[in-house]
Amino acid sequence: MTTARLDAFFRNLLDIEGFSSMDDSQNGIQIDNDGSAVHKIAFAVDAALETFEQATALGAGMLFVHHGLFWGTPLRITGNLRRRIKFLLDNNICLYGVHLPLDQHPALGNNAVIAQLLGLENIEPFGSYHGRKIGCKGTFPKPVDINEAVKKITFMNRPPLSVFPFGKSECKSAAVVSGGAADSADEAIEEGIDLFVTGENKHSIYHKCLEGKLNMISGGHYSTEVWGVQAVMRHCISELGIEAVFIDIPTGL
């Protein structure tokens, strides 16, 4: 399985080209290998030296991440970036990054999987970002309280960063935008959503949620974005028959 073939597979699976004008994260192959066949793919949230070292130890020829090394701005290849790139080249590992297309994917994306974990129905797009909705919203088949919702989406029993029980005691609807999307709480309030789930929190939205009577869960940027890479990993195993492994390196943030 060459990196070119894997790239074609991922581009067909994820809407990488559709996000090219709005996502500056250089989706796709960021560091290629020397053309050797890939027999194992490692999946992780973040491109970092610790992740690279674990991928190497596990014998992976490609590392698929949600947060890659390049974000649109030209960078000098010095310091930590040079060490990271050198490690990948020395160990012949292809680095593959997919950011917003992985958040937005209707079945394998971070938000879609969290919505599935919550048990949401009647799912629709939610969370406008540069004119495109990357999250989702839906309704619960029966009302749930915020503590029950927390349990449904907790990863590896890691507690959420914060929980705002500012709204109804029983939630009938929820919206999800993973990662750093605290400002989408405004949209949730405007649409009358009962529960908003995201990764990070912001001081500036605390009183907005309180006054808008919005329940909010900040599950952690990392913990809300493990789901997409794991879903794609399972899809690769099923469709390609390739060996794959998930590398869990939590930041606590």
Image (cartoon, rainbow, N blue to C red):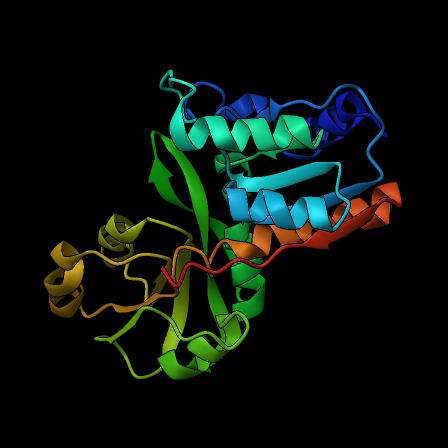
Residue 29 in view: yes
Name the residue rendered at 12%, 55% in the picture. Answer: 204
The quarter of the displayed image where residue 7 is located: top right
Residue 11 to residue 55: above or below: above
Q: Is 103 situated left or right of 168 in this image?
A: right
Q: Determine whether, in the image, residue 31 is placed left or right of residue 241.
A: left
Task: Measuring from the top left, give residue 142's x and y in whole percent.
Answer: 49, 80
In screen coordinates, is 31 left or right of 238? left
Q: Position of residue 5 (x, y in %)?
A: 80, 24
**Residue at the spot 52% in from the left edge and 75% down from the top edge:** 152
Residue 22 placement (x, y as % from top left): 41, 24
Quadrant of the image containing the C terminus = bottom left
Q: Is residue 105 visible?
A: no
Residue 125 placed where, x, y %? 46, 46
Quarter that holds the N terminus? top right
Q: Nearer the viewer, residue 99 or 209?
A: 99
Q: Quadrant of residue 98?
A: top right
**Marker count (numbered):** 0
- The answer to which image quadrant residue 189 occupies is bottom left
Q: Residue at x 61, y 24 (%)?
A: 31
- Residue 63, compared with residue 199, is above or below; it is above
Name which residue lies at 47% across and 61% down.
Answer: 223
Q: Is residue 205 above or below residue 71?
A: below
Q: Nearer the viewer, residue 144 or 163?
A: 163
